[in-house]
Image (tube, rainbow, N blue to C red):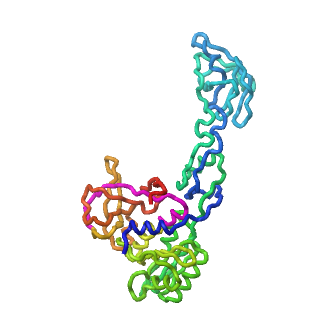
Amino acid sequence: MISYQDALRHIAAACEPLEARQTPLGQLLGRSPVDDVYSKMNVPSFVNSAMDGFALCAADTAQASSDSPVEIRVSGTVAAGHESPVGIAGQAVEIMTGAPVPTGYDTVIPVERIEAERDATGAAVLIRCREPIPPNRHLRLAGQDFQLGQKILGRGQRIEPRHIMGLAATGSDSIETRRKPKLALVMTGSELAMSGIPSGSGLIRDANGPYLRSFLDTVDAEPIRTDCVTDDPDNLQSTIQSCAANADVILTTGGVSAGRFDLVPDAIETLGGETIFHKVAMRPGKPLLFARLNTGPLFFGLPGNPIAVAVGLRFFVLPALLRLQGLAPERFLPSTCAESFSTKEHLTFFGKAHTEIDANGCLRTRLLPGQESFKINSLMQANCWAIVPAGTADVAAGERLEIAPLCPTGFLSQASAPRDEI
């Protein structure tokens, strides 16, 4: 039996990032760039107006006052998307927001701060300025937002909608990312009843399969098949072998403990796989198994109880998926324990918990009743996991502890750590 931290180190060592490929903007959400990404252009790419108004030379308004306005002839109109004429000293152009400022002009007067005479078509022909206008007013300068060659996205950073906006603005229509990991899910146990089959008469409804598939959808992994097998060694071995043909990662639930029908460890050995570790000093989910099959795929054998599955997926499988995609590992959040509790000192504990923000803006976390690994109801009331490291028996009210969101994209999620932290 190994520690949680040692288990993470073994997982990290076994995970080689998947191959890279060009990925278009529309498919980048949740992915990570293989290398740092740099702006391909200045943004804005030209000087443009931040207001509807009139572009001119600031010096032409220097003598303006409320008693002695300066009159300036308007030579034309520049709209967004149009080419701009060369500015003429002593004249102005009417300009729309986003339109290029004519060369030679250095300021824009908002339309509401000017008196304009217009012809029958509504075009301005003359403006009166009653105050001096400083240069560089209401201009968006070239490169003011992004500059050509500026780093805009780091290797290992999870891409969110805000990043896609920046990539599109700076000229990237696609970037290199790692492909999605392909996962095969195998639920083991003769007692499992699939969707549409009632429980009872010794059968238990399968909750693990639907949970695994829905969770994997949130982390940009690709479940390619789901199987349910009875407690038959030949059936289990043939199913795992079949999954290994196309999957990067195989997940099984159940069958990893020490009972007569716990068939997974023997199946891995029979198939020529290498068991990297079996049993982790943690609660729940201690019997968790991690292996590599001789054909290449990683293998996680999760215990069968639903909360053990949730913990194994969240804290062991997910770090592997992040590494396979070149994503940085997570950093969990610090919180304050709201109510004291005790746990087994020699085990890392992952507790179903609820965190709230108190009147001082601080996070306060309380452990929920119903911590048994078969109890799903308390997980539905939770919004995070409380993590208590091995070596701690009692957690007092007011003491610091770490928390993790139930899903990495959910409530309380935090920016990723540097990718070399593991």
Task: Tell me if residue 180 is in the magenta stretch.
Answer: no
Q: Which residues are magenta?
A: 318-342
Left or right: 395 in relation to 52: left
Q: Is residue 357 left or right of residue 52?
A: left
Give the residue furthest to the top.
67
Residue 338 colored magenta? yes
Q: Is residue 201 visible?
A: no
Image position of 146 with respect to 110: above or below = below
Residue 165 visible to an observer of this rendering: yes
Residue 264 position in % (x across, y down)? 46, 82
Q: Which quadrant, please, contains the N terminus?
A: bottom left
Screen quadrant of the C terminus: bottom left
Q: How many marks?
A: 0
Res. 281 image quadrant: bottom left
Question: Where residue 108 sits in the image (x, y, percent)?
Answer: 62, 26
Q: On screen, 268 above or below 408? A: below
| Residue in front for this viewpoint, 280 or 71 | 280
Q: Nearer the viewer, residue 33 or 142?
A: 33
> Where 334 falls versus 276 (above or below)?
above
Is 221 placed above or below 209 here? above
| Residue 380 found in image quarter | bottom left
Q: Residue at x 51, y 78 (%)?
A: 186
Res 147 → quadrant:
top right
Q: Give how far across and how far down residue 162 sits, in percent.
A: 55, 49
Q: Residue at 51% across / 63% down in the picture?
A: 323
Q: Position of residue 30 (x, y in %)?
A: 55, 58
Query: Which residue shows up at 26% across the image and 64% down it?
Result: 341
